Amino acid sequence: MTDYLSDTIDECLKILDENVDFLAKLEMDLEDNKEDSLETDMQLYQLIDMAEDVHDSSKLKQAEINLIKRQEEPL
């Protein structure tokens, strides 16, 4: 009886080890979905602020890319 229980526990641990990455990714996806919820009660000025933030972020990203390219160029 104890051999059966021990084998069953070992098998369960093996299955858990095989699926731990999948479960971690699933948890992260669920957390991301919570953050992606729509807000329907936003005012126009809030939407404009968000659009400006996205614009500024893309300009910063492009500036970072250009800086990296310049640093990689031989002198």
Image (spheres, rainbow, N blue to C red):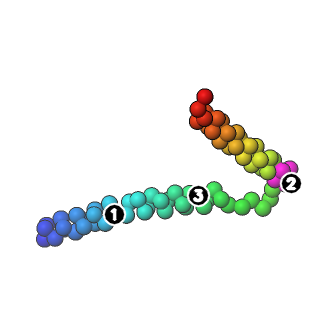
Residue beneath disc 1: 18
| SS category of the residue bearing label 2 | helix
Q: Is residue 47 magenta?
A: yes
Q: Are marks 1 and 2 in contact (CB under 8 Å)?
A: no
For residue 73, what is the image quadrant? top right
Residue 68 higher or lower than 16, as above or below: above
Q: Position of residue 48 (x, y in %)?
A: 83, 50
Q: CA distance from mark 3 to mark 1?
A: 23 Å
Q: Identify the magenta region.
A: 43-48
For residue 12, what is the image quadrant? bottom left
Q: Are marks 3 and 1 in contact (CB under 8 Å)?
A: no
Residue at 58% from the left image edge and 57% from the top image edge = 32
For residue 66, what is the image quadrant? top right
Q: Is residue 40 magenta?
A: no
Does 21 sit left or right of 53 as displayed? left
| SS category of the residue bearing label 1 | helix
Q: Position of residue 4 (x, y in %)?
A: 16, 70
Could you tell me what secondary structure mostly forms the magenta stretch?
A: helix
Residue 68 in view, yes or no: yes
Residue beneath disc 3: 32
Query: Disc count in the image?
Result: 3
Residue at 80% from the left image edge and 47% from the top image edge = 52
Q: Position of residue 22 (x, y in %)?
A: 43, 63
Callout 3: 10 Å neighbours few (<14), some, many (20+)?
few
Image quadrant occupied by the C terminus: top right
Residue 46 higher or lower than 11, as above or below: above
| SS category of the residue bearing label 3 | helix
Which amino acid type is marked by label 1? Glu
Which amino acid type is marked by label 2? Leu
Which amino acid type is marked by label 3? Asp
Residue 46 in view, yes or no: no
Q: Which mark is residue 44?
A: 2
